[in-house]
Image: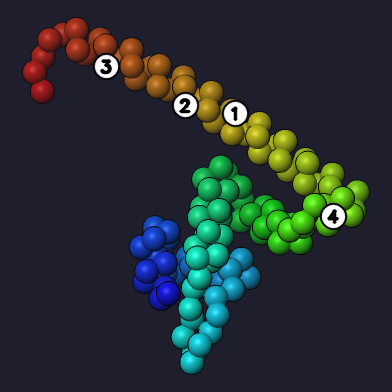
Amino acid sequence: MKISEVSIRTQLSKDTIRYYEKLGLIRPQVIHHHRDYSESDIRRLNEIKLLKHASFSLKEVMYFISLDDKFQDIEAIYNMSDEDYSTLISLIVRKQKEIDDQINSLQIAKQSLTAMNTKLNSLGREQ
């Protein structure tokens, strides 16, 4: 599929898609000098979006995806180096904590907004 369709389906700009391609995060087929993006590319782009939304830096996204590519089967995971394993576990634990912190902050903000909305509604003013 063409980049315009990928852009619509992933809600990423064409420039962003091209940038991720340049970084090697996706690898569309090139047919007659035209890129042909697959469903696999779309899944990968959506995965990148989720990781970025979860506050992964682009460097962390690239690392995470490279490990994901490298360890597609269970045997490969069992055979990964201790260093790769420790780095991956550290990254996951750190990101889980960051996400938990974001969730807590959002819950506090939501409580404040709910309280403010309740006060405003008690004034009985029409909108």
Cα separation between marks 4 and 1: 31 Å
| Amino acid under disc 1 | Asp
Give the label, 2 or 4, closer to the camera. Answer: 4
- Which is more N-terminal, label 2 or label 1? 1
Name the element at disc 3.
helix
Give the percent coordinates (x, y) of residue 90. 77, 40
Give the label, 3 or 4, closer to the camera. Answer: 4
| Amino acid under disc 2 | Leu
Name the element at disc 1.
helix
Answer few, some or many: residues within 10 Å of disc 4's Cα (few below 14, many 20 plus, some between 14 and 19): few
Give the percent coordinates (x, y) of residue 94. 70, 37
Q: Along the line of sight, which residue is nearer the eye, 73 or 49?
A: 73
- Which is more N-terminal, label 1 or label 4? 4
Q: Which quadrant does the N terminus fall into? A: bottom left
Which residue, given by chain and number where applicable, does mark 4 sit on? Answer: 75
Q: Splitting the image into 4 quarters, where does residue 4 fall?
A: bottom left
Residue located 27% across and 16% down the image: 117
Answer few, some or many: residues within 10 Å of disc 3's Cα (few below 14, many 20 plus, some between 14 and 19): few
Q: Along the line of sight, which residue is nearer the eye, 90 or 37?
A: 37
Residue sitting at the far front:
74
Which residue, given by chain and number where applicable, does mark 3 sit on? Answer: 117
| Amino acid under disc 3 | Asn
Q: Is residue 88 left or right of residue 113?
A: right
Q: Splitting the image into 4 quarters, where does residue 11 fall?
A: bottom left
Cα separation between marks 1 and 2: 10 Å
Residue sitting at the far left:
126
Mark 2 in CB contact with mark 4 (< 8 angstroms): no
Mark 1 in CB contact with mark 2 (< 8 angstroms): no
